[in-house]
Amino acid sequence: MVDMLNTGVSGLLAAQVGLGTVSHNVANVNTDGYSRQQVSYGTALPQGVGGYFIGTGVNTVAVQRAYSQFLNSSLWSATSSSSRADTMAGLTGQINNQLSGSSNLQTSLDSFFGAVNDTANAPSDAASRQVLLARANGLASTFHSLSGQFNQLSGQVQQQIGDAVNSINSYSDSIAKLNGLIRSSVATGGTPPSDLLDKRDALVKNLSAQVGVTVVPQNDNTINVFVGNGQSLVSGTQSYALATAPNIYDATRQEVVGAASGSVLSGRISGGALGALMDFRSSVLDPAQTQLGRAAQALASAFNAQHVQGVDLNGDVGGQFFSVAGPTARAASTNNGTGNVDASISDVGKLTGADYTLSYAGGAWTLRDTSGNSVAMSGTGTAGDPFTAAGLSLVVPAGAVAGDSFRIQPSRDAAASFAVVINNPDKIAAAAPLAIKSGINNTGTATASASLDGGAISGGVVQFTSATTYTVDGGAVQTFTPGQPINANGWNLQLSGTPQNGDSFTVTPNSNAQGDNTNALMLGKVANLGVLNGGVTSVGGAYSQLVSQVGSAGAVAKDEQSTQTAVYNQAYGSQQSVSGVNLDEEAANLVRFQQAYQASAQVITTANSMFTALLSAVQG
């Protein structure tokens, strides 16, 4: 009967543990990261009686969580990818809205060139000229607005990078502390507490939402956590913080670094919100800012080049219509030499849209794009013979020392500086500076057009002495090469067709500046003039490429978001199928353990009654 009593007590205690575990599961059904706990039982050692054995009850072996390391790791990976996709979709959505909103550059370009054509239709009309200046200033405002919005978005990204780093450090510190508690519980002879393990896993999941991590379990039930290409975040009970630091070329640009080592990790961060922020900044926002600036430089270059080929209402040669900033050259904060690089644009058509790093080592300068590709340079880098490469002209400082470097950004800040130089509508050079009259006795098929070559407006007579020779104002005989202009008296005469002996062309200053629209018509053609990419892409085409690139990035981000959301939902469902709390199952377990408890209590009652009856019989 004593054995019966002990057997009943063991069953009672076992059922009590089961009821407590079920209650704990039900109470935490809505706790994020909680894993369902299960009780493991084992039979107690039997008691030998003669030739047989009698059972002595049940032992509670363990209370363990329902857990799969594989499913949890899959969930962490899916969380990281899903968070990255959500963040990227949100950021690309913002920049797409900026490009398609009220600051639409294509609309401003159309309005501006529409006003140019109106001026060409009425070159002496003051109202048309005034509208043209208003549209030009509106175009400049659009460039400024878009540039400002891009800068605002850049500032937002910088802030979010800092917030993500702070969150990562907080999660890493908490994981290290839990590692210590879990290690202590194991060291005292216990098993790892399921609730602490769940809390740690939940923190790893939250950490994965911020950045892609690698988790390595250790034999003492702790975990080590790494980011990037091996930067440690958690090792045992020690956490290693990340930090942000100014970019060595641009103090306003934050980079992710190891707080202790100071090593830059930005290019090695992947996954999570932080990975999306770094990717968006380098692959979407930076190129968009550069492409917008390149469009501003192309427009200013092409329009100015044509504007100076005309004369205004006063008969003066046209000046610069637009102004725009050129390349910026930023010295590294680690430079020990003196001086800075003087960078300018030598050929706007050769600008690639890339940024470059100019470095000095071994007594020589090398140029690489930001992807690390070497870029060939010609010249010596002096003021008289500058380095030329990718449409740039670079004059390097004489005081450079080994290890010095400079970041060259040809177009990044150009859009913000775009401005209209002319403020007087009479200064719009709509007329041609020169008039050309073909000789009445010309027998060839040649027709001529003239453009200024930097000199004062003056006339002259070109007389052909044969199909391949000519004189200017009766001077020395010169050789004519078809397709090449005739340069004289500060102007260029371009012929199409074939001249013959005796043909002549008389060039005179234009006396009809008030009513002539020749140059205005040419200014209108700038809208479709190939300027960028070796003279292939117009300003409008460059903006269309920008919109297309950003739109494509947004579409890819949305598709990726849909895909990663589905992957996450599948990973979460698989993990919950093992670790999640099922209330129906717990209700059934509650009834089962309750019945077991009641039955064990009845066993104890029966044993007590039998023991009492036996005592009464013995006592007489």
Image: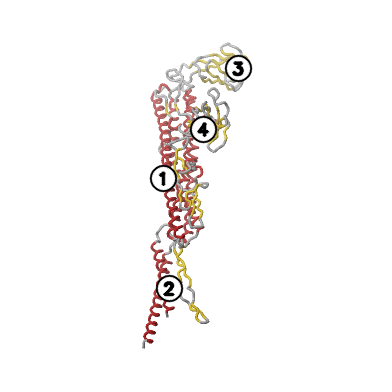
How far apart, in angstroms, are the residues tagged by discs 3 and 1? Answer: 79 Å
Which residue does the numbered mark 2 point to in the structure image?
Answer: 10
Residue 494 or 452: which is nearer the viewer?
452
Mark 1 burial class by Cα count in 10 Å: few <14, some 14-19, many 20+? few
Give coordinates of residue 458: x percent, y percent.
Answer: 50, 14
On screen, residue 155 above or below 493: below
Label drawn at residue 341:
none
Q: Which numbered disc flags the more N-terminal residue, 2 or 4? A: 2
Residue 233 lies left or right of residue 620; in this view the side is right
Amino acid at circle 1: Asp
The amino acid at mark 4 is Ser
Q: How crowded is mark 3: few (under 14 residues within 10 Å), some or many (20 or more)?
A: some
In the image, residue 430 sits, relative to residue 51, either above or below, namely above
Question: What whole-number distance in Å separates the C-alpha atoms at marks 2 and 1?
Answer: 54 Å
Residue hosting label 1: 163
Q: How many marks?
A: 4
| Residue extending farthest bottom | 620
| SS assignment at label 3 | loop
According to the image, label 4 marks what residue? 405
Q: Which amino acid does label 3 sit on?
A: Thr
Q: Which of marks 3 and 1 is in front?
A: 1
Whether residue 442 is visible: yes
Q: Which comes sooner in the sequence, label 3 or label 1?
A: 1
Q: Which mark, by number, is residue 443? A: 3
Type of the residue with mark 2: Ser
**Can residue 559 be spotted in the picture?**
no
Say above or below: 357 vs 428: below
Instruction: Give the SS element for disc 2.
Output: helix
Q: Which of marks 2 and 4 is in front?
A: 2
Disc 4 versus disc 1: nearer the observer = 4
Lower position in the chain sequence, tag 3 or tag 2:
2
Q: Where is residue 474 in the image (x, y as percent from the top left)?
A: 58, 11
